[in-house]
Image: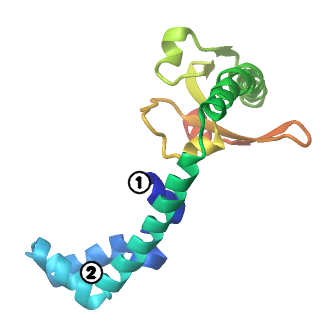
């Protein structure tokens, strides 16, 4: 359901309210409140039942769409997807893109670079700029919320453009680390 909710944007602020702000307001009004007080506050003050119903409908519609889409998936489609992931995306991501990004960044920051060793890769480290470990991920990785990994290095996100074979880099995390 989390994936369906993310795709449907069912619990975004326009649908259910800006929850962090509502919680602060609730804490001000009910400093010793409990769960039942919170529920009553949300329902009474912010049309909570209507908002939850709207969110439920959005998410459920997406669940139905995902279920229908899943029924279309056959073994051949899975095979093509796995082949694309293992061969093409690995080649472009690990091979061409990562090395090109490390090389370009080493020039920008005026440091040596190296690609990671297998033991470092298992920690999510794709290379080093000087002594700084770096992880290099497609920008779609950021949208997925860094699923299943706890990377202890700044992440450089990239977006590839097939039309001119170029990459756009997002360096916020790396800039912070390199400029300390």
Q: Residue at x 39, y 76 (%)?
A: 16
Real-space CA distance between mark 2 and mark 1, rounded to the nearest whole angstrom: 27 Å
Q: Would residue 17 be visible to someone looking at this image?
A: no
Residue 139 appears at what percent x and percent y? Answer: 64, 43
Whether pointer 2 and pointer 1 mark residues with C-beta atoms closer than 8 Å, the reply is: no
Relative height, residue 99 to residue 178 (above, below): above
* Numbered disc 1: secondary structure: helix
**Is residue 109 left or right of 165 when viewed as pictured?**
left
**Is residue 30 left or right of 1 when viewed as pictured?**
left
Query: Which sits in the foreground, 65 or 51?
Result: 65
Q: Residue at x 46, y 21 (%)?
A: 123
Residue indicated by mark 2: 25
Residue indicated by mark 1: 2
Frontmost of labels 2 and 1 is 1
Residue 43 appears at what percent x and percent y? Answer: 25, 85
The quadrant in which the N terminus is found is bottom left
Relative height, residue 160 to residue 18 (above, below): above
Residue 122 appears at what percent x and percent y? Answer: 48, 18
Relative height, residue 3 to residue 40 (above, below): above
Query: Which sits in the foreground, 130 or 64?
Result: 64
Corner quadrant of residue 81:
top right
Number of callouts in the render? 2
Q: Would residue 13 be visible to someone looking at this image?
A: yes
Corner quadrant of residue 79:
top right
**Which comes before the other along the chain, label 2 or label 1?**
1
Q: Residue at x 46, y 39 (%)?
A: 147
Residue 55 appears at what percent x and percent y? Answer: 41, 73
Query: Which sits in the foreground, 179 or 145?
Result: 145
The quadrant in which the C terminus is found is top right
């Amino acid at each position: 359901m989390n994936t369906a909710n993310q795709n449907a944007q069912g619990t975004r602020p326009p649908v259910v309210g800006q929850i962090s702000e509502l919680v602060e307001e609730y804490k001000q009004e009910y400093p010793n409140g409990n769960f039942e007080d919170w529920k009553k506050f949300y329902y009474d003050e912010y049309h909570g039942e209507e908002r939850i119903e709207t969110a439920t409908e959005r998410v459920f519609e997406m669940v139905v769409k995902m279920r229908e889409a899943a029924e279309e998936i056959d073994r051949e489609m899975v095979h093509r997807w796995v082949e694309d992931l293992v061969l093409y995306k690995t080649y472009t991501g690990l091979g061409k893109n990562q090395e090109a990004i490390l090389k370009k960044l080493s020039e920008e920051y005026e440091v040596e670079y190296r690609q990671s060793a297998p033991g470092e890769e298992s920690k999510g480290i794709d290379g080093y700029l000087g002594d700084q470990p770096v992880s290099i991920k497609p920008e779609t990785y950021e949208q997925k919320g860094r699923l299943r990994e706890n990377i202890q290095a700044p992440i450089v996100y990239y977006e590839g453009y097939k039309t001119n074979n170029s990459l756009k880099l997002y360096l916020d995390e790396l800039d912070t680390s390199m400029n300390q």
